[in-house]
Amino acid sequence: MVKRTGTSRRKTRHTMRKHARERGKLSIKRFFQEFKTGDKVKLKAEPSYQKGLFSRRFQGKTGVVHSRQGNCYTLKIKDINREKTIIVHPIHMIKSEE
């Protein structure tokens, strides 16, 4: 067997980076935002808060809120031909207008 190289945040230097004007304290509004079942949300990782962070392959994808699980939400996401369920903290989600 070959040893696995790296971690789950490998090759994310640019995708998990904030721009200079976005740096600083977290937005409390985004931290405590509420979603209803059936809402469409876009996934955008907040690099300064790692709890409830999804896998990097879902960065920029759109999903549907399925339920609430503690402080996080359960999302259904279409990944190629399969529908997958992921658990995401609301700070990593933006409400979609689609």
Image: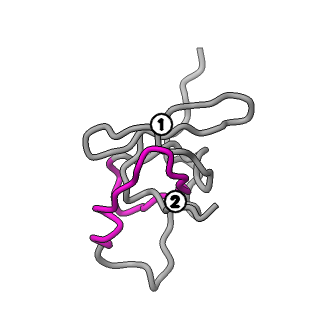
Along the viewing direction, whichever of 29 and 45 lies nearer the viewer:
29
Which residue lies under the disc numbered 2?
44
Amino acid type assigned to the residue bearing label 1 in the image? Ile
**Magenta residues (range):** 27-51
Q: Residue furthest bottom?
A: 21
Which quadrant would the C terminus be assigned to in this image? bottom right
Q: Is residue 82 left or right of residue 68?
A: right
Q: Residue at x 31, y 71 (%)?
A: 29
Q: Position of residue 92 (x, y in %)?
A: 43, 57
Q: Is residue 69 left or right of residue 64?
A: left
Which quadrant would the N terminus be assigned to in this image? top right
Q: Position of residue 82 (x, y in %)?
A: 67, 28
Q: Is disc 1 placed on a helix, strand or loop?
A: strand
Q: Check whether the beta carbons of the residues at disc 1 and disc 2 lie within 8 A of each other.
A: no
Q: Residue furthest right?
A: 81
Which residue lies under the disc numbered 1?
86
Q: Is disc 2 placed on a helix, strand or loop?
A: loop
Tag 2: Cα neighbours inside 10 Å, few (<14), some, or many (≥20)?
many
Q: Is residue 68 above or below residue 96?
A: above
Is residue 40 in the magenta section? yes
- Count of all numbered marks drawn on residues in the image: 2
Is residue 82 in the magenta section? no
Q: Residue at x 58, y 52 (%)?
A: 59
Q: Residue at x 33, y 62 (%)?
A: 33
Q: Is residue 21 above or below residue 25?
A: below
Badge 1 or badge 2: first in the primary sequence: 2
Amino acid type assigned to the residue bearing label 2 in the image? Lys
What secondary structure is the magenta-colored segment mainly?
loop
Tag 1: Cα neighbours inside 10 Å, few (<14), some, or many (≥20)?
some
Label 1 and label 2: CA atoms lie apart by 14 Å
Q: Residue at x 55, y 35 (%)?
A: 5
